[in-house]
Image (cartoon, grey):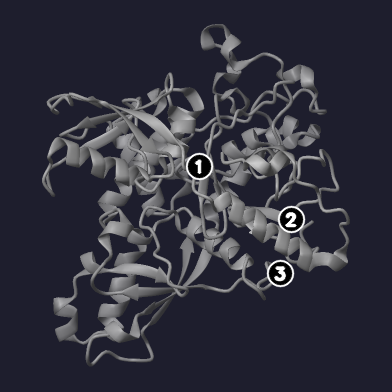
């Protein structure tokens, strides 16, 4: 809780000050998007040459939330009045340059990272390149509703977001009491925080449902097994200070995104049987042993792939519990995107 | 998560040098292919009506694990004789509505109770 802990302890990463720092870094992350209207669908008399829109979009935001801004630009600059009058934004949908549908209910940061790792399995791509905008095609008609799964409205997106929050809550604690205990105004505040990209507004409420990173190891720098031997279920009346602790959850909400699919999800208990914290390397070895061979329990790892979380190539020794508390998206999920290593830069 | 059956017997790359990057990439791509194989197994889904929703005579079904939850919703609508546009809300464990693109397999692994994935359905929003 105190700055003294922050300065004095080698495990400063588990103090609130650094937790807030990483949460803010995650929150403030943005990705460059280049959105072009499909040239075949551009209405007659459009101002060609201007039909591309560039935006630095928040990672925690969603495509339906950037549509109003995009629409304003197209109406003001590209379409003529006749075209603008008949434009129906309910028909709009997005595709990547390679032709994959972009889902309304995926956070924009996840769309970006998933695209990055999917490119890693094709030749001549490298993470080392300067970040380039993700090129999106905007279609103005005939949405493939069956595949998009969701209506393209901010309201449908909000409902999906709330569903994800509750699913994450259920994974962590075995119930959704923390989410359902929020007042309506508080739940709305979470979504408003995302819409306005307002860290304080979102975290004023989110801090009530996201696990804390204190105090498991703030007193004892070396991650000793003894610190973790008490199983979460043995928590007396659930009244101890670390009742909401990241290392006490039943499971960390995590999904693995492989290049071009599939998406994998399972229970991810934060501690191993011996009481030590589960690391990213151990987690990946359990679930993707052919890419992250389990034989190497400590560096150097002989991995064939890397893990991208919130755009960051994440160190293998990162603890899953910590990732869940500090690097999860606004919906509470840690999205681990797996890319193929093409050089030695990230090993 | 889908650990492939042959992972126990696979041999590690005998040599890891910076020179055989191409071999590593090849091996990674093969591994990815193996993780992409669809799980053909089936899991038991138990449908439970909530509120005024009609009760199903048979409520236990085996559903292919690789199906997306969207397919479960469509199956349920058909069984109930729902017309397009009739409202139907689906939840897991009376707690949350999963994303429609999540797979039955993923949901089963995370949320099954006594060997069943419990899907609640309602004609009005309940835990949305």
Residue plotted at (64% across, 27% down): A214
Residue at x 71%, y 19% (from the top left corner): A228
Q: Secondary structure at mark 2?
A: loop
The answer to which of B43 and A251 lies nearer the viewer is B43
Mark 3 in CB contact with mark 2 (< 8 angstroms): no
Which labelled disc corresponds to residue A128? 3
In front of the other: A188 or A256: A256
Q: Is residue A137 above or below residue A250?
A: below
Q: Residue at x 86, y 64 (%)?
A: B18
For disc 3, the chain is A
Front-most of A288 and A310?
A288
Q: Residue at x 83, y 66 (%)?
A: B20
- Separation of disc 3 and disc 1 at Cα? 26 Å
Q: Residue furthest top?
A: A236
Q: Percent from the top left, x then y, of residue A186?
A: 34, 35
Res. A82 image quadrant = bottom left
Left or right of A342 in this view: A77: left
Residue that badge 2 annotates: A304
**Disc 3 and disc 1 on one polypeptide chain:** yes
Q: Is residue A237 visible?
A: yes
Query: Where does the C terminus of chain A fall, quadrant-wise?
Result: bottom right
Whichever of callouts 3 and 1 sits on the residue coming sooner in the sequence is 3
Q: Residue A137's image quarter?
A: bottom left
- The percent coordinates of residue A201 (x first, y second) are 42, 44
Establish whether labels 2 and 1 are both on one chain.
yes
* Relative side of A222 to A89, left or right: right
The 10 Å Cα crowd at callout 2, few under 14, some 14 to 19, many 20 or more, is many
Q: Position of residue B23 (x, y in %)?
A: 78, 64
Q: Secondary structure at mark 3?
A: loop
Circle 1 crowding by C-alpha within 10 Å: few under 14, some 14–19, many from 20: many
Q: Which label is found at residue A333?
A: 1
């Amino acid at each position: 809780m105190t700055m003294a802990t922050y300065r004095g302890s080698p495990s400063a990463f588990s103090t609130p000050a650094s937790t807030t720092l990483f949460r803010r870094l995650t929150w403030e992350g943005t990705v460059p998007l280049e959105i072009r209207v499909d040239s075949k669908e551009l209405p007659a008399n459009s101002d060609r040459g201007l039909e591309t829109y560039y935006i630095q979009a928040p990672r925690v935001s969603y495509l339906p939330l950037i549509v109003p801004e995009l629409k304003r630009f197209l109406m003001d600059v590209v379409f003529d009045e006749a075209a603008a009058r008949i434009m129906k934004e309910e028909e709009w949908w997005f595709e990547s340059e390679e032709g994959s549908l972009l889902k309304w209910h995926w956070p924009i940061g996840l769309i970006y990272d998933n695209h990055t790792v999917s490119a890693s399995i094709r030749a001549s791509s490298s993470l080392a390149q300067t970040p380039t905008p993700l090129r999106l095609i905007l279609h103005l008609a005939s949405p493939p509703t069956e595949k998009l799964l969701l209506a393209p409205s901010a309201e449908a997106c909000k409902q999906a977001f709330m569903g994800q929050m509750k699913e994450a809550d259920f994974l962590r604690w075995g119930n959704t009491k923390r989410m359902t205990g929020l007042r309506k105004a508080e739940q709305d505040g979470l979504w408003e925080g995302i819409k306005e990209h307002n860290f304080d507004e979102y975290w004023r409420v989110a801090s009530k449902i996201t696990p804390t990173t204190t105090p498991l190891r703030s007193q004892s720098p070396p991650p000793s097994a003894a610190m973790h031997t008490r199983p979460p279920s043995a928590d007396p009346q659930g009244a101890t200070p670390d009742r909401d602790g990241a290392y006490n959850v039943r499971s960390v909400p995590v999904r693995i995104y492989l290049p071009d699919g599939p998406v994998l999800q399972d229970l991810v208990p934060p501690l191993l049987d011996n009481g030590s914290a589960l690391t990213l390397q151990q987690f990946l070895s359990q679930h993707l042993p052919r890419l992250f061979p389990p034989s190497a329990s400590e560096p150097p790892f002989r991995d064939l792939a890397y893990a991208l979380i919130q755009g960051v190539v994440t160190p293998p020794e990162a603890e899953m519990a910590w990732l869940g508390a500090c690097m999860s998206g606004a919906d509470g999920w840690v999205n681990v995107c797996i890319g193929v290593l093409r050089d030695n830069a990230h090993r | 998560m889908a650990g492939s059956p042959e992972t126990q017997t696979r041999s590690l790359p005998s040599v890891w040098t910076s020179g055989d990057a191409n071999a590593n990439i090849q091996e990674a791509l093969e591994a990815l292919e193996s993780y992409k194989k669809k799980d053909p197994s089936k899991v038991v889904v138990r449908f439970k009506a909530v509120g005024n929703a009609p009760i199903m005579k048979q409520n236990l079904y085996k559903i292919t694990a690789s199906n997306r939850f969207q397919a479960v919703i469509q199956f349920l609508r058909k069984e109930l004789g729902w017309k397009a546009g009739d409202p139907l809300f689906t939840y897991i464990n009376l707690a949350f509505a999963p994303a429609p693109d999540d797979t039955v397999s993923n949901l089963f692994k995370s949320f099954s109770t006594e060997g069943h994935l419990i899907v609640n359905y309602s004609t009005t929003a309940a835990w949305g």
